[in-house]
Image: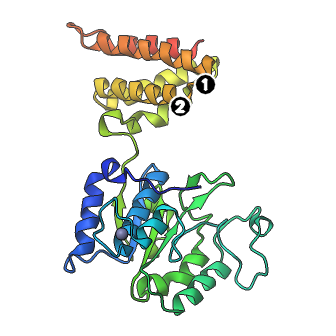
Amino acid sequence: MLYYNNEIDQKLPKLLEYFANGIVDENKNISHCLLFWGPDITSQCELALEVARLLNCSEDKSKTCECLNCRWIKEQAHPAVKIYTRLDFKEAGGASDDEDSTKGKKNINIGQAKAIINELAVTSDYHRVYIFCDRDEDGNLLPLNQMNFPEATSNALLKTFEEPPKNTTFIFLTKDKSDIISTVVSRAQAFFVPGVKEENEEYSLVEGVIGNYWTIARNDVLEFETTLMKLVAENEPKEIFTQMQNYLLAMIKSNLNNKHLYYRFVEDLGYVEEAKRQISLTPMMNLQTVVENLSFKMILK
Ligand SMILES: [Zn+2]
C-alpha cells in the first residue's frame, strides 16, 4: 500500500510550508519528535512522508525532484524512512518475517522497541524517519492508541525519543493527543492535521450525532431528535445544518455503488436543505418543530 501523495502541498499547504521553511532554516529547529493528531491518519502519513522527503532530498527539495532519495520515498522504498505498525515489524531475533509472524499481533511490543534501538546504534548516511501508526490487514492506516502502542513500549523507547542519534526523526500519528502516553507527548512537538475535507466541507460538529444515522432504529427516533435538538441549541443552527449537509455529501461520495443508501442520502440532503430554509424565514419557524420534522424524516424510513 503506497501512501505518498504528490498533491500533499495542496492538501495541507500551511503545515507543509512550516516544515519546508523549518527544514532549510537552521534556526527554526524542527523537533526530532513530531506528533500529528487529527481525524485523518492517511493525510498525516502523507505529510510525514513529505517531511521525510524534505529531510532527505539531496537536491532542491522541489516536489518534482528526481534525486534518488526523493524517488525512493515516493515509491516508499527508502531504506531509512519507515512506517512502523504492529504488523510491519520483524521480531527481534525472529527467524521469519512472513505474514504469519504478525498475524493477530495486538501491538508494537518491547521486542520491536529493542530492534529499533539496535538499528539506531548503527550510523546511517540518511536522515532516518520512523513513522509510528497502526494499520489493518488491508493496509488501511489507523491511529496509535494505548492498545497498539502500549506504555511499556513507549517507556522502552523514551530515552531514544528524548536523545535520538543525529539525523533521526520520529513521527507519531494519532487521532487525539490523549491516546498517546503523556511522557511521549511531552517530548514531542504536536501538530493538528485537519482532515481531507476543506474547511467548508467540515462536519466534525455533527459527526457524533448523525454519524451512521441510517443504522438508528425507528423506535429510537425521539432519542435522535433530543440529541440533535441539543446540538442545534448549543450551536449556531445554520452551521449545524450546513455540517449535516457536508456529512451527507461525503456519504453520497463514498456510497456511489450502494443505490439504497445513495438515494436515502440524496433525499435527506433535501430535507436538511428544507430545514435550513425554514430557520432563515422571518419570522423564523420554531426550532424545535424544524428539528422534529427533520428527525422524523431522516429516521422513519
Ligand atoms: Zn530530491
Q: Quadrant of the C terminus?
A: top right
Please count the marks in the image.
2
Local secondary structure at mark 2:
helix
Coloring basis for residues: rainbow
Q: Residue at x 29, y 9 (%)?
A: 285
Q: Position of residue 182 (x, y in %)?
A: 45, 71
Q: Is residue 46 left or right of residue 220?
A: left
Q: What crowding class fits label 1: few (fewer than 14 Cα within 10 Å), some (14-19), or many (20 or more)?
A: few
Give x and y (percent) for residue 152.
Answer: 61, 78
**Could you tell whether 300 is left or right of 252 in the image?**
right
Secondary structure under the numbered disc 1 in the rendered image: loop
Q: Is residue 122 left or right of residue 259?
A: left
Task: Please indicate whether residue 81 sits to the left or right of residue 243 in the image.
Answer: right
**Res. 143 visible in picture:** yes
Distance Cα–Cα, label 2 vs label 1: 8 Å
Residue situated in front as seen by the camera: 172 or 5: 5
Could you tell me which residue is drawn at 48 percent across and 37 percent down?
208
Relative image position of residue 233 (x, y in whole percent): 33, 27
Q: Is residue 5 above or below residue 22?
A: above
Number of other residues with Cα within 10 Å of mark 2, as a class: few under 14, some 14 to 19, many 20 or more: few
Residue 186 seen in the figure: no
Residue found 76% across the figure and 61% down from its top: 104
Instruction: Name the residue beneath numbered marker 1.
Output: 257
Looking at the picture, which amino acid does disc 1 mark? Asn
Q: Quadrant of ligand 1?
A: bottom left
Q: Is residue 276 above or below residue 207?
A: above
- Viewer-nearest residue: 279 or 258: 258
The residue beneath circle 2 is: 254
Residue 213 quadrant? top right
Q: In the image, is residue 158 above or below residue 182?
A: below
Locate the N terminus and report the quarter of the image it occupies.
bottom right
Query: Which kind of residue does numbered mark 2 sit on?
Result: Ser
